Amino acid sequence: MTTQRTQPPDGDSAAGTTESECPGTKIGREALGLLLLSFGALGGLGALGALHWTAGLSAALVGLCVGGVLARRSAQRRWQQDSGAIAAFCGYAGQTAVLFHLAPPLGWLAVSVLAVAVGFWLSSAEGA
């Protein structure tokens, strides 16, 4: 005797439960993903910090700056945009301080890059 399986209407041939049947599955998967992401980032920062403290600190500050920029771009409320801008500024200012500590010319290079970026932003803004 042969049994015939029916395919789901969306064309997915995988057998098993769907997320509408198990809503906790999606939440658990996201929680596990965030946990692994956090431990991976912490391990990477720890490894860089073991090589040299400025490498770990620089990676953390660059991550803070990039995270602030991404948070600001995707935010819808004003306070979220402001907190993203503050995080990006703190990350960039901290990285500039680390570069000044390593070698003053690198610090001045970071200040110059910021001046170029602000100048580019001001000159390319549309309408007044």
Image: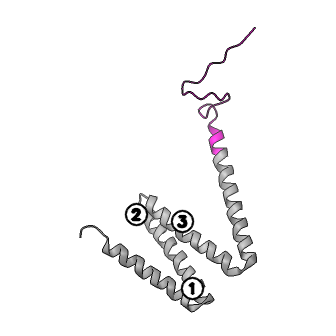
Q: Which mark is residue 78?
A: 2
| Of the two numbered discs 3 and 2 in the rendering, the one whose residue sits closer to the viewer | 3
User: Which residue was labeled with disc 3?
Assistant: 67
Residue 31: image x %, image y %? 66, 50
The segment highlighted magenta reads: 1-28
How packed mark 1 is, by other alpha carbons closer than 10 Å (few <14, some 14-19, many 20 or more), is: some
Choose the circle earlier in sequence order: 2 or 1.
2
Is 20 left, or right, of 119 in this rendering? right
Question: Tag 1's secondary structure?
Answer: helix
How packed mark 2 is, by other alpha carbons closer than 10 Å (few <14, some 14-19, many 20 or more), is few
Q: How many marks are shown on the rendered structure?
A: 3
**SS under mark 3:** helix
Identify residue type, mark 2.
Answer: Arg
- From the top left corner, tell me how far across and down residue 66 is, in percent: 53, 68
Label disc, if present, on residue 97 of the rendered structure: 1
Mark 1 is on which residue type? Ala
* Tag 3 near tag 2, CB within 8 Å: no
Query: Disc 2 and disc 1: Cα gap in Å?
Result: 28 Å
In the rendered image, the residue lying farthest to the bottom is: 104
Label at residue 13:
none
Q: Quadrant of the C terminus?
A: bottom left
| Residue 15 placement (x, y as % from top left) | 67, 27
At label 3, counting other C-alpha atoms closer than 10 Å, the crowd grade (few under 14, some 14-19, many 20 or more) is some
* Quadrant hosting residue 4: top right
